[in-house]
Amino acid sequence: MIAKLIRAMLLLVDWGRCMTLEMKTSCEQCLAALDMAGFAYICSYECTFCEACGEQMSLVCPNCGGELVIRPCRSSS
């Protein structure tokens, strides 16, 4: 679990250059609302899924076949 969180956080850094994630507001599978500070899974292409759908898909993105990792939370400020 920690390794997946670290990998997700590494998506934010591209060789020292800060990148911004698109924080999608709904699950691409079931369309459930996602809070920016809440739990969600993303792949390297930023496909976004709720916890239930991500786990139902065995943490594999149905769009690209890549690994789903925990999306970093963004504070409300």
Image (cartoon, helix red, strand yellow):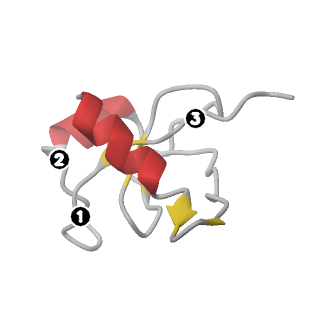
Question: Identity of the amino acid at label 2?
Answer: Met
Q: Alpha-carbon distance for marks 1 and 3?
A: 19 Å
Q: Residue at x 46, y 42 (%)?
A: 71
List x then y, in percent, for residue 60: 18, 55
Vertically, is 16 above or below 30?
below
Disc 1 target residue: 62
Residue toward you, 66 or 14 = 14
Q: Quadrant of residue 51?
A: top left
Q: Residue extending furthest right?
A: 77
Q: Quadrant of residue 6?
A: top left
Disc 2 target residue: 57
Q: Residue at x 64, y 50 (%)?
A: 23
Q: Quadrant of residue 44?
A: bottom left
Q: Secondary structure at mark 1?
A: loop
Q: Alpha-carbon distance for marks 2 and 1?
A: 8 Å
Question: Identity of the amino acid at label 3?
Answer: Leu
Disc 3 target residue: 34
Q: Residues within 10 Å of mark 2 (few under 14, many from 20)?
A: some
Marks 2 & 1, CB-CB < 8 Å contact: yes
Q: Residue extending furthest front?
A: 16
Quarter in which the C terminus is drawn: top right
List x then y, in percent, for residue 59: 19, 46
List x then y, in percent, for residue 8: 40, 47
Q: Which mark is residue 1?
A: none
Quarter in which the N terminus is drawn: top left
Vertically, is 63 above or below 42?
below
